[in-house]
Amino acid sequence: MDVYTENPNYKPVSFSSTTITELMIPSYSNFGGKIHGGIILSLMDKVAYVCAAKHAGNYCVTASIDTVDFLQPVEVGDLVSLMASVNYVGKTSLVVGIRVISENIKTNTISHTNTSYFTMVAKDENNQPVQVPGLILEDRTQVRRFLEARSRRQLKHNYKHETEKIVMPEDEEICREMLVGERCTIAS
Ligand SMILES: CC(C)(COP(=O)(O)OP(=O)(O)OC[C@H]1O[C@@H](n2cnc3c(N)ncnc32)[C@H](O)[C@@H]1OP(=O)(O)O)[C@@H](O)C(=O)NCCC(=O)NCCS
């Protein structure tokens, strides 16, 4: 009996791993001739949905995106590939890690565009969050990704807690003092 049969409420990472490849056509470009970041974001949201919904066996929504830092511009004519896999599961949420690369087919060069993490939440027919299956980690890389995602989740929780403590002082003079050295001015 394999591990999947032994754990019917668990699915292996490979069950939902998804790759999509798309040709970057001229209508995707901005005034500078490079591909709009929004095109890449839209493709990322799509592949995250496919991967999450397949694991969850339910409709999923995007709850948050953990940073999108574009490392390289993408050119018209490039082939962009997005490789997505479930990195982590909570109760009703899961984290899909997405690696985006672009390939120049003439020169055979491949550039790493970005790696981002989408938190997706599974919903039932009443639009309520619903439990997702557990995750079967098949190798050390998957174990590392799970642990990293769990740490990011904890850091995000701490960050939210800390930023909630930021309050604007009532006294305008104190605000002015706090803004000394910043490139802004309070009108009037
Ligand atoms: C995200 C959403 C489902 C959370 O709903 P909620 O009633 O606050 O649900 P809960 O507080 O019970 O959280 C459900 C899960 O989502 C996670 N979650 C909620 N907000 C989150 C956020 N901003 N970032 C990461 N995870 C989040 C929780 O940690 C929880 O995970 P767990 O069950 O694995 O522990 C809800 O706010 C929603 O539907 N938002 C709109 C999503 C959407 O439409 N996206 C597309 C935008 S166009």
Image (spheres, grey):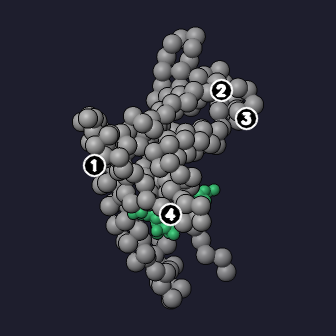
State which mark lies toward you, 1 or 2.
Answer: 1
Q: Which mark is residue 31?
A: 3
Label pair 4/3, CB-CB below 8 angstroms:
no
Q: Quadrant of the C terminus?
A: bottom right
Which quadrant would the N terminus be assigned to in this image? top left
Q: Which residue is mark 1?
A: 147
Label 4: which secondary element:
loop
Q: Position of residue 95 (x, y in %)?
A: 42, 50
Q: Amino acid at mark 4?
A: Pro
Three-letter amino acid code at the position of disc 2: Met
Image position, residue 123 (x, y; %): 54, 59
Q: Nearer the viewer, residue 148 or 146?
A: 146
* Dot placed on the residue nearer the N-terminal end, 1 or 4: 4
C-alpha gap between disc 3 and disc 1? 41 Å
Residue sitting farthest toward the front: 1
Mark 4 beta carbon near ligand 1 (under 8 Å):
yes
Distance, label 4 to label 3, CA atoms, is 41 Å
Mark 2 surroundings: few (<14), some (14-19) or many (≥20) residues within 10 A = many
